[in-house]
Image: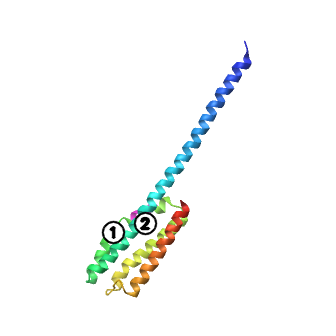
Amino acid sequence: MNWGSQISTVIGVALGIGATLLADRVRYRREQATRSKDALRDLYVRYLKTLNESSSSLRLIILKETDPAVRYRAALDAFRESSVLEHRYEINLLAPRAVKEKSDQAYRLLRNFRDLLECEPDLTLSSPEYIQALDRFHNARKALQETMRENL
């Protein structure tokens, strides 16, 4: 009996199985990284969309409401109804530290923008306070977008 051919066969089978397992592992990691990146991209888009919608809601409230108490209550309700806080928590859990920090900054500026409706009862779209608050928020959102893009 020729042991050489049987040993060669066993070694060939072991190498084939090993190569297949290695290829499957590499493919699994690549797919997992792709899924993770896709999930982050979706989260980033949802968060940015929510920030924009909240900002637009505040703008509409300034246009529609004249009574300061009603205006601020409407702003609080619009802010609460948006899922900006929910998405912020997701960002805090899933995103890297740089994105989280920029996210917190944009959120705080949006919240300050909302609170401006209570502090400035006569606020209009042409008020310097409004323009400054909106510019700070837009700059923070732009910085957040750039950091998110770098992460992806």
The question of residue 13 being in magenta is answered with no
Magenta span: 85-90
Q: Position of residue 47 (x, y in %)?
A: 42, 64
Image coordinates of residue 134 in percent, x first then y, are 42, 79
**Residue 22, horizontal then vertical, whole percent:** 61, 38
Q: Earlier in the sequence, mark 2 or mark 1?
A: 2
In this picture, is 131 found above or below 11?
Answer: below
Task: Identify the image quadrant of residue 4.
Answer: top right
Badge 2, how many Cα within 10 Å: few under 14, some, many 20+?
Answer: many
Q: Which secondary structure, mark 2? A: helix
Does residue 70 sit above or below 148 in this rendering? below
Residue identified by numbered label 1: 80
User: In the rendered image, which residue does mark 2 sit on?
Assistant: 48
The quadrant of the picture occupied by the N terminus is top right
Find out whether residue 88 is within the magenta segment.
Answer: yes
Which quadrant of the structure image shows residue 43?
Answer: bottom left
